[in-house]
């Protein structure tokens, strides 16, 4: 008896190699931004780092773990965003990807903060994202496409007490990302929004949250978000991830 057999061949991996890619990261001095910078350097990427304070950025550059440059950058200022992109092109000749990570979180009631503090958060989280994208798009188009990854928050999909204004800025980022995906796809620019729930960073224990918060033991790590960024950038160019929500196993989705 003859038994017919069929052989199937599967591609084990089609990850894009991001070695040598030029990747701009805002809010790169701590937390998710710093973790992402370190992870991408480990992959051989060339990183361009911006933040309002650069102590940690300077230390990372001095460690010579890879090709990295940095500059002071307040994304509330369009001119600072332009300077960050110009640094990338001057240093490495092009821009392949931009990680919009800088953000501010204020946790409290609608009357708990001054007008100035709330305005700082709204300007950073929404306007700063817009200014960063506007500064990056001409360079990405010139390079025949690339990636824009916006680090948002699960609060962009839900809201509750003591998060109303913060959540409003994150809902705005979601709307921006969806519109940008539709607008820029024809230019071969992929737009991804990553929306983590609570993550173990200084950001998470900022205004309105404390170091002894018992819930922190179940938070995700900054390296988890760095992994997500890597995954997005390494996708084959024929596909894109638009919206990615991330929640730890110990947290409820509601």
Image: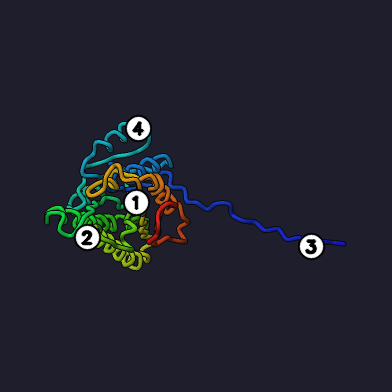
Q: What's the image's color scheme? A: rainbow
Q: Which mark is residue 2?
A: none
Q: Which mark is residue 64?
A: 4
Instruction: Tell me the residue at 27%/37% (across/down).
Output: 56
**Of 15 and 138, the residue lying toward us:** 15
Q: Secondary structure at mark 4?
A: loop
Q: How far apart are the two marked residues, 2 and 4, measured between alpha carbons? A: 40 Å
Which quadrant of the view contains residue 176?
A: bottom left
Question: What residue does disc 1 label?
Answer: 198
Please report whichever mark, 4 or 1, sits nearer to the chain's N-terminal start.
Answer: 4
Q: Residues within 10 Å of mark 4 (few under 14, many from 20)?
A: few
Instruction: Tell me the residue at 33%/31% (across/down).
Output: 63
Q: How far apart are the two marked residues, 3 and 4, measured between alpha carbons? A: 58 Å
**Of 172 and 181, the residue lying toward us:** 172
Q: Which mark is residue 4?
A: 3
Please report whichever mark, 1 or 3, sits nearer to the chain's N-terminal start.
Answer: 3
Question: What residue does disc 2 label?
Answer: 165
Please report whichever mark, 2 or 4, sits nearer to the chain's N-terminal start.
Answer: 4
Please report whichever mark, 1 or 2, sits nearer to the chain's N-terminal start.
Answer: 2
Q: Secondary structure at mark 1?
A: loop
Q: Is residue 26 left or right of residue 20?
A: left
Q: Residues within 10 Å of mark 3 (few under 14, many from 20)?
A: few
- In the rendered image, the vertical position of residue 119 relative to residue 24, given as above or below: below
Residues at marks 2 and 4 touching, judged by CB atoms closer than 8 Å: no
Q: Secondary structure at mark 2?
A: helix
- Which quarter of the rendered picture does the C terminus lie within? bottom left
| Percent coordinates x, y for residue 213 in the rendering | 31, 45
Instruction: Tell me the residue at 22%/57% (across/down).
Output: 131
Please report whichever mark, 3 or 4, sits nearer to the chain's N-terminal start.
Answer: 3
């Amino acid at each position: 008896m003859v038994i017919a057999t069929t052989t199937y061949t599967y591609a084990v991996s089609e990850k894009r190699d991001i070695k040598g890619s030029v990747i701009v990261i805002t809010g790169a001095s701590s937390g998710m931004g710093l973790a992402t910078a370190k992870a991408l350097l480990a992959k051989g990427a060339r990183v361009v780092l911006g933040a309002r304070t650069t102590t940690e950025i300077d230390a990372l550059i001095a460690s010579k773990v890879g090709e990295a440059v940095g500059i002071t950058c307040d994304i509330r200022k369009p001119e600072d965003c332009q300077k960050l992109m110009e640094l990338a092109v001057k240093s490495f000749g092009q821009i392949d990807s931009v990680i919009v990570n800088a953000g501010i979180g204020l946790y409290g009631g609608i009357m708990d903060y001054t007008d100035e503090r709330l305005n700082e958060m709204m300007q950073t989280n929404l306007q700063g994202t817009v200014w960063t994208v506007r500064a990056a798009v001409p360079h990405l188009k010139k390079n025949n496409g690339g990636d824009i990854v916006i680090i948002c928050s699960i609060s962009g999909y839900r809201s509750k007490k003591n998060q109303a204004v913060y959540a409003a800025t994150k809902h705005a980022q979601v709307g921006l990302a969806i519109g940008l995906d539709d607008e820029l796809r024809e230019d071969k620019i992929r737009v991804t929004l990553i929306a983590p729930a609570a993550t173990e960073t200084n950001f998470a224990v900022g205004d309105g949250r404390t170091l002894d918060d018992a819930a922190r033991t179940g938070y995700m790590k900054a390296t988890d978000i760095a992994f997500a960024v890597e995954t997005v950038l390494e996708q084959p160019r024929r596909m894109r991830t638009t919206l990615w929500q991330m929640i730890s196993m110990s947290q409820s989705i509601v």
